[in-house]
Image (spheres, rainbow, N blue to C red):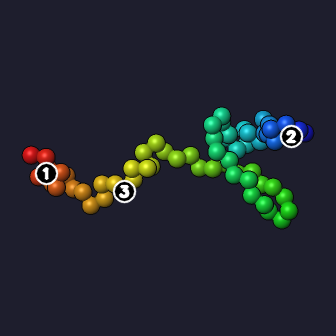
Amino acid sequence: MTTLTQKSQVTIPKQFRLALGLRPGDDVDFEWDNGQVVLRKKARKLPFDKWRGVLKGYTSKKFNEEFR
């Protein structure tokens, strides 16, 4: 059993944190499912995901030509 704090926060019990593999700083989603709230761990983004596709179509040959 957990209690809602003055700031509307709750503590996720250890058994659920372990089952979901939650660590401090992880993002979670709350969803409705047939009138119940479901807690889901959001997938972690890799640090370089924001750069994915930036060099699309950029070949080593083109790189060498531009920087020689």
Left or right side of 27 for 52: left
- In the image, what residue occupies the spot 39% across and 53% down? 52
Residue assigned mark 1: 66
Specify which label sits upstream in the sequence, 3 or 1: 3
Q: Mark 1 or mark 2, which has the lower sequence index? A: 2
Q: CA distance from mark 1 to mark 2?
A: 60 Å
Please provide percent x and percent y for residue 14. 78, 35
Q: Residue at x 77, y 54 (%)?
A: 38
On residue 9, the disc is none
Discs 3/2, front: 2
Q: Which residue is mark 2?
A: 4
Q: Secondary structure at mark 2?
A: loop
55 w.r.t. 44: above or below: below
Seen in the picture, residue 61 relative to 4 is either above or below; the reply is below
* SS type, badge 1: helix
Mark nearer the N terminus (3 vs 2):
2
Tell which of 17 and 55 is nearer to you.
55
Q: Residue at x 85, y 62 (%)?
A: 35
Q: Kindly report the distance in space between the C-alpha atoms of the residues bearing marks 3 and 2.
A: 43 Å
Q: Looking at the picture, which amino acid does disc 1 mark?
A: Glu
The quarter holding residue 26 reads: top right
**Dot 1, crowdedness within 10 Å: few (<14), some or many (≥20)?**
few
Q: Are marks 3 and 1 in contact (CB under 8 Å)?
A: no
